[in-house]
Amino acid sequence: MAGRMVVGATALSAVAAGLVRPASEPDPAGAHRVLPVLPELSGLLPNRGLRRGSTVAVASGRPARGGGSSLVLALLAEASRSGSWCAVVGVPTFGAVAAADVGIALDRLALVPHPGPEWATVVAALIDGVDVVVVAVPPALTASVATRLAARARQRGSVLVPYGPWEGADVTLQVMRGMWEGLGQGRGRLRRREVTISARGRGAAARPKEVKVWMPGDGATRAVTATGRPPATTGSPLVPTRSGPAARRAALTLVGRSAS
Amino acid sequence: MTAPVRTLLVWCPDWPVIAAEIVDGVPASTPVAVLHANRVVACSEAARAEGVRRGLRKREAQSRCPQLTTVDHDPGRDARAFEPVVAAVEEIAAGVEVVRPGACALAARGPARYFGGEERAAEQIIEQVAQTCAVESQIGIADGVFAAGMAARAGQIVEPGATPRFLAGLPVGALGRPTLTDLLRRLGVRTLGDFAALPAADVLSRFGFDAALAHRLAAGRDHRPLAARRPPVDLDVTDTYDEPIDRVDVAAFAARSLAERLHDTLARYGLACTRLGIEAVTAHGQELHRVWRHDGLLTAAAIADRVRWQLDGWLSGQGRVRPGGAGRVMPPRPTSGIIRLRLIPDGVLAHVGLQPGLWGETGEERERAHRALSRVQGILGPESVVTPVLGGGRSPGDQVRLVPWGDERVPTRPGAQDGDNGRAVPPWPGRLPAPAPALVLPTPLPAAVYDVAGELVAVTARLEVSAAPARIAVGSQALVEIVGWAGPWPVDERWWAPAESRRRARFQVSLADGTALLLSLAAGQWSVEAIYD
């Protein structure tokens, strides 16, 4: 009886000290305002994650062609894995296999491939209920609609991720260079790509940052060397190295970081 | 022990033949025989006149009646066609048991009292069945279902208490147990009366339980109560409005009271519905029906919301075709107000309470997301919000199936992705190695691949590349230099089904501008299947 009393008292004091929290609560104080991102990308974002209510744009096109879609997937991966709901609007070419490989939970991912002329209504409705909303920016977007959507995201606490040209985003991520590895003249296969991502934005993110990552990475090469050159891979080149969650987690590997 | 129930049995003669006429349009006035396992199961009156009998072989039946039409036996068809007959009988009498397709029984007491006599009741029922279903029927009334069935064949009403005497004159074959009948005949027992005269204990010890049951039937002691079927309850709720509703919020308000009524009805039967059909009809007869899916029970507020979204989408629909959607046309904007709203519960199941997740997985966030996605479904149509499900396949497009939000997540093909749960899954040899392309084109882009000399690159039947690819033009864009390539990787899929067979060679190429493509070459035509973006 006395022992139980002591245990009860300890538990009470632990609650009082804030040491015990319900298992359903994902993170301690304040962190629920920021959705997690992969550790390699956290250096680019002001709060080391996707702050709820912010707009994080991913620019497409110049200077490098390509890389943007992979960057969007990588941005969603950690948030989706930790239980957030995601929606992708206006991307009929969405590669779901690649999304699953990065770590996005497909049962918490909704796609609206063809939003049609009611684009703004659809996006606004999604902002109301979904944590991260990725939107392919339509060509005829007026600044007023963009401002309104960003304000709505701020009010509802969702993260808006426009993919394309977007004025006034909190942070704009852009792929500067991308180079694939693993393909020779008539042999090998695509293995991974070294990508340079730059971030610029407003406020806390005003100082431009740049980071080099493997995206998508190769499950076999997790070690990062100082020069950015990975050790030679072992194993036959044509055998898929996708061998389970361990390989999937390493879809993105940090190569080096420089602040300019 | 109580006396056997006074039973009225409605019997439609030659039901399999009649069912074939109703469902398949085989005229029953011509010689028709229904066959099962090469034996005649039932035949029409015309065929019987030519000498066709039950149990005959097909060739024998055809030799007796050369113009015979034969139909395969289908118990499902018989049951389906009998359903309207049962419904017709249920309209004027309660508690109907379907004995088999073609025969249904009910307690005679109620209709006899109501119509003023058993004979009058029988006439009424025959009339009702003939008028609503255009089916001829006969009625027999006796004590017990078995005796009533026998009486129906003769179309007679057996006086109360006279059933054992009526049965005594029938041959033992009427029991419908061929082996027992055969044995009894060889023992010299030819009528049910002879059989009933045997001591019950001896029948049980000599012939077994089934024969003891048959013995009770033969003696007119059929105590089995009727297993009356319960007609399916009508769960729809409808409301009509004298003043046409022409504003969405008014309609939503009306739907709210309708939803409360639906909830009362469902709760009274202890049911929940997983799909809900909402139907709105305007004064000009335009109709909009849409089915909404939900995991749990929709609350009255949620139903009102859905009515509002549905009508919202309708009012702003304006008969356009959604781009890329499978040609689905939104119904045109209604020209008048709504006069009728109807809620139709579908996918009804017993409500055993909802089980929420232990750690709050199915908590508030999930609710919120579902609400938002249902809202978008209300704007664009249910199949415009999709969620990907991974399955098996050799190309990135094949591995993904897009299911409408809220539908069951079942992949098209079993895949190597879900091999963790111990099921055997096909390995899909030849599928592309990781990493997977981030952009998969729904329709491949045509392309042209040239070698250094400017000739189109080709692949022989033995998978030899004519020359190393050097430049590529995708669509109508300018030529881009190829810096790395691998292939050809052959894929020969579904060669056993000519309509779906695909034979192609795939290449991975990386270009000078930093992009990488998945190309395929089929029948001399290059195309871009996916982009490693």
Image (spheres, rainbow, N blue to C red):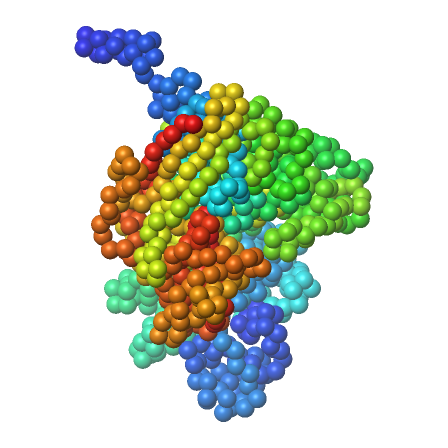
Apparent side of residue B401 relative to residue B435 in the rendered image (left or right): right
Q: Does the rendering let one see residue B502?
A: no
Q: Is residue A234 above or below residue A27?
A: below
Residue A32 in the image: x percent, y percent?
43, 22
Residue at 71% from the left image edge and 45% from the top image edge: B317
Say above or below: A143 vs A3. Answer: below
Residue B225 position in % (x across, y down): 46, 53
Closer to the camera in the image, B514 or A153: B514
Quadrant of the drawing holding the N terminus of chain A:
top left
**Res. B397 image quadrant:** bottom left
Q: Is residue A72 above or below residue B437?
A: above
Q: Residue at x 73, y 42 (%)?
A: B315
Query: Is A175 rendered above or below residue B226?
Result: above
Q: Is residue B281 left or right of residue B301?
A: right
How many numbered badges does the structure rendering display?
Answer: 0
| Residue under the point 29% across and 8% down | A13
Q: Residue at x 52, y 78 (%)?
A: B71
Q: Position of residue B337 (x, y in %)?
A: 79, 41
* The one of B272 and A151 positioned closer to us in this rendering: A151
* Left or right placement of residue B330 versus residue A7 in this view: right
B110 or A225, nearer to the observer: A225
